């Protein structure tokens, strides 16, 4: 690889690199070929030089494979430090991933951008999920075996939200994840638990599959409801119980100095500050106020519910039957 051109003295610095190889192995059949038929260009993001972002323009060759039985008639030259279909060098990807192990994807995106490396949080999350998927099972089990597991927490998490879910297992002593299971079926959880007979306590949510998996895979262990779900369930139940007694906010006294204060009652069927369990009344009020130009947030604030609830009401053609307003 030869540096053909350097452009830009400040960020970003652009380097044009031209390949100098004359032969390459076909990825289809592995046969070396020296028949260069054309060149192609790739733009890549490289790790920054000091505080300056670095962009590479890579000019590499396309080769022709002469093996008659090979289906790969033309192939592109492979560059070891720039994997195919990637828009970054491997070093750049590794640098961003190093950050991602220490912080959230959103924070990684922001920190990487200040260093001149661009990657969306979606991309960073996809890298992490791909890494977890390719991790050999033996390595995962070995990681779990570094200490004697006596208590674990199991819960589901999304490989792809709304479509595919797995199970994460967390060591209750170290609070560190010890394994990721490909799904949340009882048989998968039971298989995993059978490989860890030292477990005495399993914290789980109230999903039936985890209860069954724990019962079959670790009958010696005591199952407990985890604190997060207990508090969540408790909060939801309390919200439903106190809702009928939740008094409306006292209406503010009219300001005699403010002549612009309307004397007319509010145009919505519900008064401001009213929390209602009646979806019909809230739906009508939300639509009426929305037509008058009241924002999503203002609507939510007015009826003591979440923006998501207001959004769902606005999206619905008619009141939703079994709606419990979310509390803020
Ligand atoms: Zn070939």
Image (spheres, grey):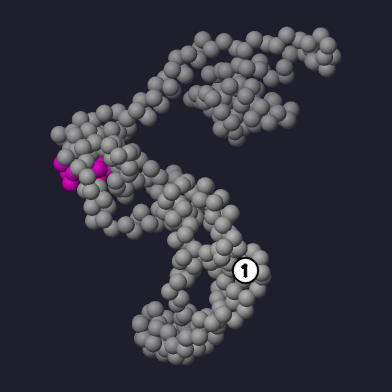
State left or right for residue 323 relative to residue 209: right
Residue 207 horizontal/vertical position (percent): 31, 33
Q: Is residue 210 above or below residue 282?
A: below
Q: Is residue 209 visible?
A: no
**Residue corresponding to mark 1:** 13
| Image: 227 above or below 151 | above
Name the image quarter holding residue 196. Answer: top left
Left or right of 323, for residue 201: left
Q: Is residue 267 visible?
A: yes
Q: Main secondary structure of the magenta part?
A: helix
Residue stretch in magenta: 185-197
Residue 153 coordinates in the image, percent (x, y): 29, 37
Q: Quadrant of the C terminus?
A: top right
| Residue drawn where x is 52% and y is 47% of the image | 106
Image point (60%, 63%), residue name: 52
Which quarter of the figure has residue 248? top right
Disc count in the image? 1
Which residue is depicted at the point 64% across and 22% down?
A: 302
Whether the magenta-drawn stretch holds residue 189 is answered as yes
Magenta stretch: includes residue 273? no
Spot occupied by residue 235 in the image (x, y as percentages of width and height): 43, 22
Q: Is 31 displayed left or right of 289 in the figure? A: left
Q: Residue furthest front?
A: 50
Mark 1 nearby-residue class (10 Å; few <14, some 14–19, many ≥20): some
Q: Secondary structure at mark 1?
A: strand
């Amino acid at each position: 690889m030869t540096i053909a051109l350097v452009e830009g003295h400040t960020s970003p610095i652009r380097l044009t690199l031209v390949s100098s190889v004359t032969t390459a192995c076909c990825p289809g059949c592995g046969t070396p070929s020296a028949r260069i038929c054309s060149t192609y260009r790739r733009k890549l993001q490289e790790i920054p030089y000091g505080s300056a972002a670095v962009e590479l323009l890579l000019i590499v060759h396309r080769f022709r494979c002469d093996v008659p039985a090979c289906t790969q008639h033309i192939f592109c030259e492979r560059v070891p430090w720039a994997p195919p279909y990637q828009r970054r060098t491997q070093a750049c990807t590794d640098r961003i991933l190093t950050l991602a192990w220490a912080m959230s994807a959103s924070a990684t995106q922001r920190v990487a951008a200040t260093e001149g490396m661009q990657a969306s949080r979606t991309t960073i999350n996809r890298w992490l999920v791909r890494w977890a998927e390719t991790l050999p099972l033996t390595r995962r089990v070995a990681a779990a075996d570094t200490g004697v597991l006596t208590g674990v927490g199991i819960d589901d998490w999304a490989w792809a939200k709304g479509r595919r879910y797995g199970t994460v297992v967390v060591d209750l002593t170290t609070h560190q994840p010890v394994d990721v299971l490909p799904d949340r079926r009882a048989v998968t959880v039971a298989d995993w638990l059978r490989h860890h007979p030292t477990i005495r306590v399993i914290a789980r949510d109230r999903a039936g599959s985890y209860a069954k998996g724990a019962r079959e895979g670790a009958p010696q262990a005591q199952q407990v409801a985890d604190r997060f779900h207990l508090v969540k369930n408790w909060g939801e139940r309390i919200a439903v119980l106190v809702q009928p007694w939740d008094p409306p906010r006292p209406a503010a006294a009219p300001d005699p100095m403010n002549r612009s204060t309307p004397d007319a009652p509010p145009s919505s069927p519900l008064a401001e500050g009213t929390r209602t369990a009646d979806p019909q009344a809230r739906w009508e009020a939300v639509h009426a106020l929305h037509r008058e130009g009241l924002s999503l947030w203002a609507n939510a604030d007015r009826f003591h519910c979440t923006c998501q609830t207001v959004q769902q009401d606005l999206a619905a053609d008619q009141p939703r039957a079994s709606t419990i307003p979310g509390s803020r």
